[in-house]
Amino acid sequence: MQALDLLLNRVSVGRLLEPAPDAAQRELLFRAALRAPDHGQLRPWRFLTVEGAARAKLGELFASALLAGNPEVKSEALDKARAMPLRAPLLVAVIARLTAPHKVPEQEQLLSAGCAAHGMLLAAHAQGLGAMWRTGELCYNAQVMAGLGLAANERIVGFLYLGSVEGERRTPPALAPADFVGSWQG
């Protein structure tokens, strides 16, 4: 796949099926992540894979965190939280490891981890895999972070859902760069 074609046509794929990426595909996903811009060469990221029965356990962690935050939560919301990790055969939790104090601000370290996630999305698309970057309130939940074993200096950037594409990949909408680009004249 040509690099510009990849950049111009990558889309999120929400309907993902087995099989999950194989070992060789995963190696390329993580190698792409490790090429993210990294001011200070801190490598401010790490990754956790979640697959098989661990996906249901993650769903239980999500439901437990939701219930702890709101004892009045409806059973439908708990069921939805439990089902979230089951939407793909492989999830990758992208975690920012923030070093502070450091000359590289924490925000730049967080952005670097975000770029690592984007690199994985591009590598997935280049290999014909489907992928979606999902966030939401549970990414920022202290109980979820503790359940995943995050240290005090770590943050969840998001969960990458990975698998095989169900059906046809959608075509991205055409956006006009002029709608987003301006010129500053001082």
Image (cartoon, rainbow, N blue to C red):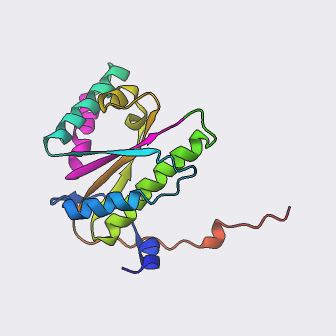
Q: Is residue 82 above or below residue 114?
A: above
Q: Is residue 162 visible?
A: yes
Pick out the residue farthest to the bottom: 2
Pick out the residue farthest to the front: 41
x and y, in percent, of residue 101 in the image: 60, 32
Side of 49 where 186 appears, left or right: right
Question: Which residues are drawn in magenta?
Answer: 75-99
Q: Residue at x 27, y 26 (%)?
A: 64
Q: Is residue 76 magenta?
A: yes
Q: Is residue 107 above or below residue 60?
A: below
Of residues 116 and 51, the one nearer the viewer is: 116
Q: Is residue 43 above or below residue 130?
A: above
x and y, in percent, of residue 46 in the image: 38, 44
Q: Residue at x 27, y 60 (%)?
A: 27
Side of 66 where 42 appears, left or right: right
Q: Is residue 140 above or below residue 28?
A: above
x and y, in percent, of residue 123 in the image: 35, 66
Q: Is residue 12 visible?
A: no
Side of 168 where 42 appears, left or right: right
Of residues 20 and 12, the one nearer the viewer is: 20
x and y, in percent, of residue 53 in the image: 13, 41
Q: Residue at x 53, y 49 (%)?
A: 111
> Where is residue 84, by image quadrant?
top left
Q: Residue at x 19, y 34 (%)?
A: 57
How many callouts does the rendering have? 0
Query: Which quadrant: the N terminus?
Result: bottom left
Query: Which quadrant: the C terminus?
Result: bottom right
Q: Is residue 70 magenta?
A: no
